[in-house]
Amino acid sequence: MVGAGAAGTMAAIFAAKSGAEVVLLEGSKDGGRKILISGGGRCNILPMRVGESRFVTDSSANTLRRIVRSWPLAEQRAFFENDVGIALADEPESVKVFPASHRARDVRDGLLALAARNGASVQMNARVTDVVPESGRWRVEIAGREPMVADAVIIACGGLSVPATGSDGAGLAIARALGHEMHPTYAALTPILAAGSSFGALSGVSLTVTLTARSSERTATATGGFLFTHRGYSGPAALDVSHVLVRAQVPGAAPATLIARWTSLGDAEWTEALKPSGTRTVTGALRTELPERLAAVLLEIANVDPARSLAELRREERIRLINTLVRCELPWAGDEGYKKAEVTGGGVSLTEIDSRTMESRRHRGLYFCGEVLDAFGPIGGYNFLWAWATGRAAGTAAGSGAASRAAPPSAASSRDA
């Protein structure tokens, strides 16, 4: 295996379980760094339920669905509880699953321990620089070390997101050099920049909103937590739609807009809420549904006097205000890029792999799993679910093949998949 991140470690577990001699090569000194920082250090290990349509890919959606279904959510939960020995706890308000200990380290350490119990050899500080086909086998080049020769190689090197964890795109470069079709990569699940807007004074204000990012080429909508920051917007809703804005900044791409519905109320509900009611003011009506500071900014944008009573509110003012509450266009100026991105969009096209085994269609004995593939899901455990499913499939197939040939170790290299 190349990479002791989520997908790579899972691949090592199942490859070794299949009876192959497995070496897990990790470029960092400890591995699993994205696991450790996920969920604020708690590790959102899985979602409570899966909406397949929430995954994003430029490849075949049918192929993606087959891969996601290859290891159902209930079976993944059972694996972590029974095989890894980690008790899980649901968080219904966020629809997320965490280790009951709320310690990400327990997940990382538990997976590495299971890989070792299954017989995998884990080598840290082993940075893979190239993977080269050689006489029907594979030569794995390792910085500062003698190369390894293996019957099968699993690339689980992650993408380009959060480079501080060691992600440098090495797996993408290897895949490209070996002739695979690649979809352009981009930062996904990343905060949005919006300097100098009317919302600039709202840093720290948070609420649940519905955001829609739209261009002529793609659309994404998400409902969830939203946070105004001193640089722009963050929170799950902002991150989940950010890829549309990121891709709109590519030269020649269609421009994109960002629209906010600030509450669960639509036009009809707000029309009812803004009906005259004694001496109640417009500000009073908004503050029942919105943070006070945000309500003040929205009234300013709608050009409505905050002290005006609902009885005095003119029809055109009501229309402007409802549009601002339900369809507010948010200014944006960019994004935080890979430095803050949760995942990498794009990568190895899913048409390049066998969806049952993750084996390359171009090179026998070469497998891909995790973030290096062209697919990602929203915040909430989806990307770990993808890593676990693709890692298991790759490990099972590569391990079975290597074991049947009874050859030297199957090498797997990764830097946090």
Image (tube, rainbow, N blue to C red):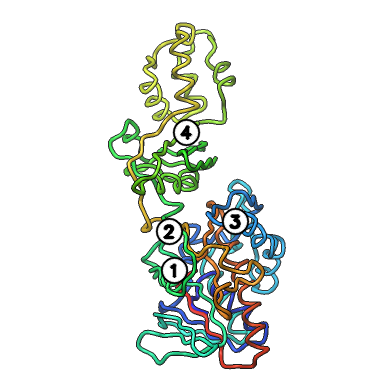
The residue type indicated by label 2 comes to Thr
Residue 87 occupies which quadrant of the picture? bottom right
Q: Which residue is mark 2?
A: 185
Nearer to us: label 2 or label 4: 2
Q: Which residue is mark 3?
A: 60
Residue contact at pointers 3 and 1, CB within 8 angstroms: no
Question: Which residue is outermost to the left?
Answer: 196
**Secondary structure of the residue carrying numbered label 3:** loop
Which residue lies under the disc numbered 1? 172
Q: Amino acid at mark 4?
A: Ala
- Is tag 1's residue or tag 4's residue first in the polypeptide sequence? 1
Q: Are marks 2 and 4 in contact (CB under 8 Å)?
A: no
| Separation (CA) of disc 1 from disc 4 | 35 Å
Question: Which numbered dot is residue 260?
Answer: 4
x and y, in percent, of residue 370 in the image: 54, 66
The Cα–Cα distance between marks 3 and 1, rounded to whole angstroms, is: 19 Å
Helix or strand or loop: what does disc 2 sit on?
strand
- Sequence-wise first label, 3 or 1: 3
Which circle's residue, 3 or 2, is located before the other in the chain? 3
